[in-house]
Image (spheres, rainbow, N blue to C red):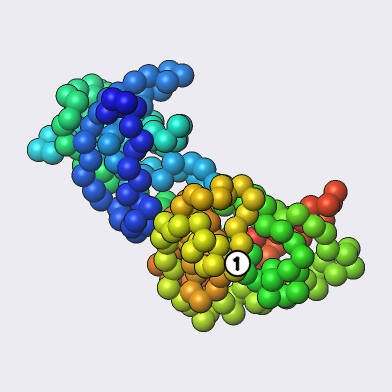
């Protein structure tokens, strides 16, 4: 396999709080009318797992030229940084970089922090769901974008209990936030990951694989490929706006103080 077909090294897997790094430029291509840069490694989180992508810019050392990263996607292990060269004085510069050149990566800090807080809040909800006696609900997908984040669960809650459980959830999750706790992530062998996640892993995690597990404080971990806060307390505060139960599924809608 050639260098451009090799998987992109995901630096944020090892350090979720790294905002600046160096990488080797491999190639540039046009995809659906958009320019995309491919690097050997990246600290930019691509959209996925219910989390929006990072934004920022990629710069050439000792040059004013910048490539503004407006969206990031991953396909078959390769990360594509979509955007365009910076526009200076009304003129869009041309991105001229030779393969194997070093480039500098800069992730937008405010967007990364917001995405990480929303994502961590979604996982914290999973913990509170068990704490308030809803352990029969099986975690499903999450939507951790600012415009209406929610976590979906397989299972239902009696209609008459929705309001009381909403209040219990909001209270419990904010107690967890106030208590705080360090957040960590590690790629582990399957058995070790299962043990850290309460004894078992979701069915979509292939047996024998080495999933990345995120652990929030002393609570059980969960498999996740996203970015998170350093400490649970950084979420600051959460509001559970609504719980809906329909067709065997329960959705918990939440928001955080921005």
Q: Can residue 171 be seen in this snapshot? A: yes
Q: Which residue is at the front of the view, 56 or 42?
A: 42
Q: Which residue is at the front of the view, 227 or 136?
A: 136
Q: Determine whether, in the image, residue 79 is placed left or right of residue 143.
A: left
Name the residue at 13% across, 38% down.
61
Residue 106 lies, in percent from the top left, at 28, 46
On screen, residue 132 above or below 21: below
Q: Determine whether, in the image, residue 204 is placed left or right of residue 25.
A: right
**Quarter placement of the N terminus:** top left
Q: Which residue is at the front of the view, 257 or 232?
A: 232
Residue highlighted by disc 1: 199
Name the residue at 85% across, 48% down.
247
* Secondary structure under the numbered disc 1 in the rendered image: loop
How many dots with numbers? 1
Residue 73 lies, in percent from the top left, at 45, 35
Q: Quadrant of residue 166?
A: bottom right
Residue 98 lies, in percent from the top left, at 17, 24
């Amino acid at each position: 396999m050639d260098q451009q077909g090799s998987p992109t090294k995901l630096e944020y897997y090892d350090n979720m709080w790294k905002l600046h790094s160096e990488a080797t430029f491999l190639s540039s291509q046009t995809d659906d009318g958009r320019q995309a840069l491919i690097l050997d490694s990246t600290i930019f989180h691509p959209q996925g797992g219910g989390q929006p992508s990072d934004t920022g810019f990629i710069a050439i050392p000792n040059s004013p030229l910048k490539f503004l990263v407006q969206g990031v996607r991953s396909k078959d292990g390769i990360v594509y940084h979509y955007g365009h060269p910076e526009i200076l004085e009304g003129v869009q510069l041309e991105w001229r970089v030779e393969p194997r050149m070093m480039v500098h990566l800069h992730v937008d800090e405010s967007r990364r922090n917001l995405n990480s807080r929303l994502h961590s809040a979604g996982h914290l909800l999973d913990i509170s769901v068990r704490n308030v006696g809803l352990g029969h609900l099986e975690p499903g997908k999450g939507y951790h974008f600012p415009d209406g984040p929610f976590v979906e669960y397989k299972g239902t809650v009696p209609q008459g209990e929705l309001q009381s459980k909403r209040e219990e959830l909001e209270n419990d999750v904010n107690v967890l936030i106030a208590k705080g706790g360090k957040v960590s992530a590690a790629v582990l062998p399957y058995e070790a990951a299962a043990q850290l996640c309460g004894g078992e892993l979701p069915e979509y995690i292939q047996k024998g694989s080495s999933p990345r597990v995120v652990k929030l404080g002393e609570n059980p971990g969960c498999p996740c490929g996203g970015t998170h806060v350093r400490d649970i307390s950084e979420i600051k505060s959460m509001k559970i706006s609504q719980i809906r139960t329909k067709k065997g599924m329960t959705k918990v809608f939440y928001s955080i103080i921005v």
